[in-house]
């Protein structure tokens, strides 16, 4: 039943809860936190991609007036190692530095200038070692090893990751394999087999707010203000490192200026805590932009994709070999690798599949979680190859896709959640919107389509929330979802307001504080609207039940005869009570509060390939039209249409904003962004040399279409959105370029140089 | 059943939860809070006891560099009036200043010195008015009126207070009357009738930490760090004054350095908020000691007590006329007056009683809540008069009391909770401990007894709490009880640890923050151990129920076959699970938390004199031995024995500490403390001229006896304690003085001058 019209708050463009604070500059981010006596920290970073640390002398630095503490490898003694998936990191490098930028020492001082000055006084003797700076080098036989240990393992987001024993003596640290059917036989039966290799560049998250932490360690208690996407998980990391129970660690999360996965797990927060512990005062550690480039990136990847088809265009078999370059420390690499592998099947019916995805250490900056968790790397490959195949088979790329798309209710893999969306409907709408089949107005113009899906919600989710009604009927929502700019506070407040029948502005979201905010595993994977949304909706309904139970006694009616609307409880016979009146009658004075609680927990199933069925399917379609300048190789994006299956848009304007942001984000890695290394040195760690898209890169004709079929498991039929917008962009543009000028590109970003060289090669061919 | 021996944590001297922080100086109080850009406030106060404010010119002050805001009477426009019981206060005086110290303007500036400088530049024209500075002046016919309005009314702690209409044109603002039987007839039948008048001085709470507030007002949102005993109620006051909903006000309570009632309700917190609003930055307003003297005091009182007895020493009738001087603003005066009136019956069986208690405005500093809420004023009177009567009847004061004491289970008044303690047992123990009946070793020594009771827990209580178990089995307690030094965090943590079968140090108390901490009406009236104690115990049991329900599935046993002990769930057949193991099995990963909630709410009953039956009876006994120096009149307290009926001591050492502190506090108003006014000016608003007891004032022989009969309604049979220790002190000492040197004193404090004059008068009589 589509009850959209009946909603009072859901589906309406309420003003952002955090809007006024943000536009007036009053919103507090971690960088704004200032505590009495607070010291400022700076990190000394390795200038070598790989080097043994022979001797560290920090005596001069310690003697500098204004210096409170210097942390060197000696301070790791007694502390636990850490890392998102594997515990392969230390607060500063101990035996070896493993990439240019690897923290080797840190200083807390009266101000940043003094801290910088102290860094210059730290004397470190390095013994430079040969390094592996690319997948090729790392995978070569007899390659230098980034880590000496033979194997590693750990739990991440409810799953166990292990380094297989046979990887000893290599730079491999994780493998994900998935197979169904018999690809060997199927390739034999196929009329044609296509094999292509695509690469994806190293790009940085580029949050407007770099990584920031303020840590205050007193005795055995750690208080931390952190720009983090998963405070509860960060708390666990800190508990392990500092060997204190969880209730001795309090993490407060102010507004976060963008996360994109780069603020998941644990980065330099433990270093800030160690500095505070040693300096005996609060310590503020705020990265520069350059430092965030040296802290975490997305995984560069190489995807070899082999697909067998019948003559009439049915997909028969697919085999993928994926290598994800995770840099010097694994961070979330194993998980990203697993997701890349699992998602390499695409939104198509392929009876026989086999995927092997590997995580590879190199002496480069660690790669971690990034929007899509490996999906972008594989969608770039599979949706580009779909057009290659269609071309070779003489089929229209749209028709070819339609022949193979999974139907709603069909299984992606056995044991997983059935597909919860009509893929065909969306693809046809995308095609129509771009004018598929109509000729482009001008030469050197072309169109391209892409359709992508990912298992939404990450994997295993545990979440809870509380909704409180004060004695005056005003409402407070306690949620562990981090407001990273995505508008979570607004959407979650809408859910509360709708359920309680109060105006939107009666709901306020309390500050996130792990001591008191109900547990939530993390803010990632476009999951909050579904996962936290359900927790919040259940909490609001729990509160509602309690309110109606009280009201039923007062209004002498059964709870199910009552309804909440306009801040009142309405009963039969035109009787009603305002919420403050109800509260007053319950507490017999102007006092008290009623709290509702709600929770969500994914199920686990051994039948599911990833151990837990997908929470929802995040599905998106993209259609692009480009114009290629044959003289310069420049790709001009003329038009882009993005479709997102949002189920039900809680706040349509913000959903569109999220989707547009996603597309813009993907224009970056499609056309512009690439971290460039030379001899292990990052050449462009700043906004001048590393280009992120600006508004000038957006197509004039830019449309987002929200597909709303109330087909999501979230509140009011909602699904998560945000990452979806990114997925089809690169391949839709790559396919358009082929359609425009007949050159096929395999390596992102599609820079003018690459296009021009391809055009030259084509001419000379 | 006395299960004391079975307890693992209850009744044991666990280290204070806040001990380490406090002795190392790391504990954060409101004065320690510092925010970026924070301004410092100073208050300009009226130099006149009563004056019309003719003109305020603050232009020069506003122009002083470093001044961010000046608040004058103009800024009250649009704001609501406020006050604990009646809304008779404004952020600064508007039409008239009503006492020396009444705020008339305030400044927020870059530092305190600049703020002080700006105050000197504010030009105010006053028109001095005649003032009433004592009960006598205020009650005289045709007296100047402190307030012009005819009547006032308001709700305080779940009760309604009103100024009777007939008080128009007087300085009376509230009356409490209670009567049972027929005192007129009873006095006629009495063999003897005694009528005496006692007075009680004006004393200050003298918390080690003066009143302190840091306010941050942004748009319509108020965040406040405040040294307050009732943050949730303060939030309501602010909501009314600034006309914002409760969810827009967040009050965070750091440690509080003593309250004693002086930090209940609302003081200068709204002024701090108004300054922040106007200065557009956080504002810190910290009183000097002198300013706290000019903010709130205990009620000076005059108690006329008339008692009729039979020849053989049975109390027949009592009539009390009580006047409580509430100063320039009512604050909690009506409630204190009500309590003084209701508690004037004492712990005795008196068939006929009549009490009239009045609240009287004067042009002096407002009097508000103070430990005992009016009880000290009346116990001084009734327990002194008991000895006067015994003396006249030729009865031993102990025997006379024993004849009349209420029995356990007897009613104090119809409709109230029956007496929950054996009063006789305690009195006999007190008598024995002081060596009653044995002659004092030296001349001029004497002994005295007193037995007092008050309805504990204030009146109407609404409270709630939450207890959370983290995935590692560590525990967080969320409680709205303010740690004012009484050790609430420790005692409440013990209750949690006992219920959950975990070691005491596994429990941590989260910071009190009205946004997220479960509602609690206030921290007062020795109530927290019972009221919050029950909420906390219920929350812990709710958590335990959930844990056992989960464990019962895993251990394949019924929940009632399981027990929590030593951080494990134990089932049958030696099977057991650690709490982290249990949590891991519930959440299928290292994630999640389980939260228990508990609440407590007093009942209301029209049959109860105060609308709500007493939560528990706080009963205490005191026995003193003094030596009087006939030459100087100095009273030397030789020995003091205090007995407190604590029901069950959760933490015996802290109970003793509370009781000893209470006695010491009462030694102040008994022997030393009095705020001295001359021409409306307070002459001794500082520690040099106003003496509070020091350790040298304690008797060498000082004993506290905890009476533990598990007779309280609180957790494990506990009752509240703290205020009880104060109650008998003054009369036990007064009676000892009479016993020693034969002079009866009616006016506290019992200074050497008064004693010497009484001795002289006796000689010449």
Image (spheres, coloured by chain):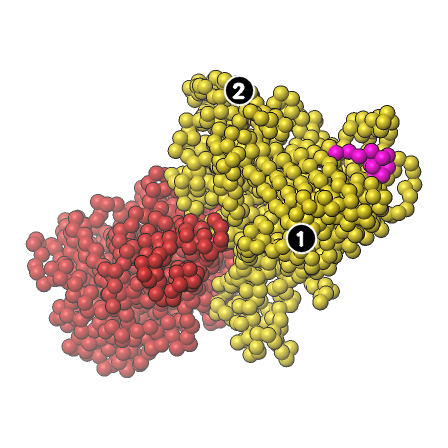
Chain colours: A yellow, B red
Q: Nearer the viewer, mark 2 or mark 1?
A: 1
Say the numbered circle drawn on residue A129. Answer: 2
Q: Quadrant of residue B244?
A: bottom right
Where is the N terminus of chain A found, in terms of image quarters?
bottom right
Residues A602 and A244: in front is A602
Residues A633 and A222: in front is A633
Q: Determine which residue is flagged by label 1.
A: A412
Dot 1 alpha-carbon crowd within 10 angstroms: few under 14, some 14 to 19, many 20 or more: many
Identify the element where label 2 is drawn.
Answer: loop
Question: Would residue A145 appear left or right of A347 to someone viewing this image?
Answer: left
Question: Would residue A358 appear left or right of B1 to someone viewing this image?
Answer: right
Q: Residue at x 78, y 36 (%)?
A: A697
Where is residue B190 shown, x and y percent of the image?
Answer: 22, 79
- Numbered range of the magenta stretch: A736-746
Q: Quadrant of residue B209?
A: top left
Identify the element where label 1 is drawn.
Answer: loop
Q: Can residue A24 be seen in this snapshot?
A: no
**Chain of the residue under the numbered disc 2 shown in the image:** A
**Do callouts 2 and 1 point to residues on the same chain?**
yes
Q: Quadrant of residue B430?
A: bottom left
Q: Residue at x 53, y 72 (%)?
A: A549
Q: Evaluate if marks 2 and 1 touch, with contact meaning CB atoms under 8 Å apart.
A: no
**Chain of the residue under the numbered disc 1 shown in the image:** A
Q: Considering only order in the chain, which callout, 1 or 2, is on the residue closer to the N terminus?
A: 2
């Amino acid at each position: 039943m589509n009850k959209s019209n009946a909603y009072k708050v859901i589906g309406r463009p309420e003003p952002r809860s955090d809007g006024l604070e943000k536009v007036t500059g009053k919103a507090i981010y971690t960088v704004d936190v200032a505590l009495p006596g607070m010291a400022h920290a700076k990190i000394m970073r390795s200038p070598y991609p790989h080097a043994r640390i022979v001797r560290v002398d920090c005596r001069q630095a310690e003697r500098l007036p204004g210096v409170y503490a210097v942390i060197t490898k000696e301070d790791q003694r007694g502390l636990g190692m850490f890392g998102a998936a594997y515990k392969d990191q230390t607060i500063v490098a101990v035996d070896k530095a493993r990439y240019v930028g690897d923290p080797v020492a840190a200083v807390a001082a009266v101000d940043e200038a003094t801290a910088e000055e102290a860094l210059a006084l730290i004397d470190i003797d390095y013994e430079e070692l040969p390094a592996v700076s690319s997948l090729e080098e790392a995978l070569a036989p007899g390659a230098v090893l980034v880590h000496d240990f033979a194997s590693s393992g750990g739990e991440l987001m409810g799953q166990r990751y292990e380094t297989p024993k046979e990887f000893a003596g290599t730079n491999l640290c994780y493998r994900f394999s998935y197979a169904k059917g018999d690809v060997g036989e199927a390739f034999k039966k196929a009329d044609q087999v296509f094999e292509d290799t695509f690469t994806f560049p190293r790009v940085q998250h580029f949050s407007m707010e770099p990584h920031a932490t303020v840590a205050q360690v007193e005795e055995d208690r750690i208080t931390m203000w952190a720009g983090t996407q998963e405070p509860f998980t960060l708390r666990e990391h800190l508990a392990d490192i500092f060997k204190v129970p969880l209730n001795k660690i309090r993490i407060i999360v102010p507004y976060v200026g963008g996360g994109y996965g780069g603020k998941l797990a644990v980065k330099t927060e433990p270093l800030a805590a160690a500095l505070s512990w040693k300096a005996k005062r609060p310590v503020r550690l705020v990265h520069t932009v350059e430092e965030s480039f040296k802290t975490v990136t997305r995984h560069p990847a190489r995807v070899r994709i082999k697909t067998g088809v019948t003559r009439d265009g049915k997909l028969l078999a697919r085999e993928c070999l994926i290598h994800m370059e995770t840099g010097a420390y694994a961070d979330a690499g194993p998980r990203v690798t697993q997701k890349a592998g699992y998602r390499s099947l695409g939104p198509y019916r392929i009876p026989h599949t086999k995927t092997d995805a590997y995580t590879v250490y190199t002496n480069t900056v660690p790669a971690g979680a990034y929007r899509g968790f490996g999906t972008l790397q594989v969608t770039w490959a599979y949706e580009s190859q779909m057009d290659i195949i269609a071309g070779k088979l003489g089929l229209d790329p749209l028709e070819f896709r339609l022949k193979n798309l999974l139907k709603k209710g069909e299984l992606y893999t056995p044991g997983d959640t059935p597909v919860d969306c009509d893929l065909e409907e969306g693809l046809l709408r995308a095609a129509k919107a771009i004018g598929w089949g109509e000729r482009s107005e001008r030469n050197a113009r072309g169109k391209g389509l892409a359709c992508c899906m990912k298992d939404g919600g990450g994997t295993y989710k545990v979440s809870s929330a509380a909704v409180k009604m004060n004695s005056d009927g005003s409402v407070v929502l306690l949620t562990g979802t981090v407001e990273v700019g995505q508008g979570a506070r607004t959407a979650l407040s809408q859910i509360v307001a709708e359920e309680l029948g109060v105006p939107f502005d009666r709901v306020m979201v309390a500050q996130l504080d792990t001591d008191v905010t109900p547990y939530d595993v993390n803010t990632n994977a476009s999951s909050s609207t579904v996962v936290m949304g359900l927790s919040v909706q259940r909490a609001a309904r729990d509160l509602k039940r309690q309110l109606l139970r009280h009201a039923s006694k007062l209004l002498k009616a059964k709870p199910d005869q009552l309804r909440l609307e306009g801040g009142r409880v309405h009963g039969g016979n035109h009787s009603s009570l305002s919420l403050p009146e109800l509260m007053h009658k319950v507490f017999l004075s102007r006092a008290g509060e009623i709290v509702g609680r709600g929770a969500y927990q994914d199920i686990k199933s051994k039948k599911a390939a990833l151990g837990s069925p997908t929470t929802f399917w995040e599905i998106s379609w993209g259609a692009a039209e480009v114009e290629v300048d044959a003289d310069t190789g420049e790709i001009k994006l003329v038009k882009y249409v993005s479709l997102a299956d949002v189920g039900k848009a809680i706040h349509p304007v913000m959903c569109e904003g999220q989707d547009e942001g996603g597309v813009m984000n993907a224009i970056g890695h499609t056309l512009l962004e690439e971290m460039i290394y030379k001899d292990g040195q990052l050449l462009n760690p700043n906004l001048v040399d590393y280009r992120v898209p600006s508004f000038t890169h957006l197509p004039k004709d830019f449309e987002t279409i929200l597909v709303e079929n109330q087909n999501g498991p979230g509140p009011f039929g909602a699904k998560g959105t945000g990452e979806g917008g990114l997925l089809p962009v690169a391949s839709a543009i790559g396919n358009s370029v082929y359609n425009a000028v007949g050159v096929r590109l395999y390596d992102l970003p599609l820079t003018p140089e690459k296009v021009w060289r391809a055009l030259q090669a084509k001419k000379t061919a």
